[in-house]
């Protein structure tokens, strides 16, 4: 430790970098406040890196210094009366990827009913239904919801996914 090395040559391969520029559009004329997320389509070594731009207004965002690869850009509205989302696949090769258009559409509502088997079912209001983040989506939008007395639930602001529903 603390040793000085003189005359050491480091050979690093040059890797091109690019900027991804995205624009959202939706049913409203005025672009809402949007949160953007960029992530690789495939995780590397079980890890997925996410870049997030929270609370962007004006419907535009840029992500500089992106290495070549395949990405997904996700846009979600923040604080909108109707949650909206959209995504676009991107491939970066060796130049900037500009004016990627993401069309916002309403988020989904996942609703259902818990069914208990047995002589005396537990009180359904004691349960919480959650939709945890997945590798593909990073997040689902919905943190969770309580189950009502009639055993029904409705998760709002859900993005399409192959996901696991948790009941706790």
Image: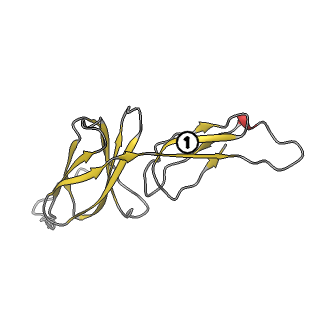
Asked which secondary structure carries label 1, the reply is strand
Specify how the rendered protein is coloured. Answer: secondary structure
Tell me if 123 is positioned left or right of 42 in this view.
right
Instruction: Report x, y in % for residue 134.
Output: 48, 54
Q: Residue at x 28, y 51 (%)?
A: 102
Q: Residue at x 23, y 50 (%)?
A: 2
Instruction: Report x, y in % for residue 94.
Output: 14, 65
Q: Quadrant of the C terminus?
A: top right
Tell me if 133 is positioned left or right of 29 in this view.
right
Picture quadrant where residue 45 is located: bottom left
Instruction: Report x, y in % for residue 154.
Output: 59, 41
Name above or below for residue 56 compared with residue 164.
above
Residue furthest toward the right? 119
Tell me if 151 is positioned left or right of 47 in this view.
right
Q: Which residue is mark 1?
A: 155
Instruction: Tell me how many marks there are.
Output: 1
Name above or below for residue 16 compared with residue 121.
below
| Mark 1 closeness class: few <14, some 14–19, many ≥20 residues within 10 Å | many
Nearer to me, 88 or 81: 81
Instruction: Report x, y in % for residue 38.
Output: 31, 52
Picture quadrant where residue 39 is located: bottom left
Residue furthest toward the left? 7
Name above or below for residue 72 compared with residue 30.
below
């Amino acid at each position: 430790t603390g040793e000085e090395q003189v005359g050491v040559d480091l050979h690093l391969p040059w890797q091109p970098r690019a900027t991804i520029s995205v624009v959202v559009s939706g049913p409203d004329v005025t672009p809402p406040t949007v949160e953007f997320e960029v992530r690789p389509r495939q995780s590397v070594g079980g890890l997925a890196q996410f870049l997030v731009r929270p609370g962007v207004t004006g419907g535009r965002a840029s992500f500089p210094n992106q290495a070549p690869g395949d990405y997904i850009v996700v846009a979600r509205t923040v604080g909108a009366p109707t949650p909206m989302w959209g995504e676009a696949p991107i491939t970066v090769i060796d130049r900037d990827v500009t004016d990627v258009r993401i069309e916002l559409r309403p988020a989904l509502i996942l609703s259902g009913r818990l069914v208990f088997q047995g002589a005396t079912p537990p009180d359904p209001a004691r349960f919480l239904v959650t939709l945890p983040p997945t590798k593909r989506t990073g997040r689902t939008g919905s943190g969770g919801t309580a189950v009502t007395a009639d055993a029904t639930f409705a998760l709002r602001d859900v993005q399409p996914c192959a996901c696991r529903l948790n009941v706790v």
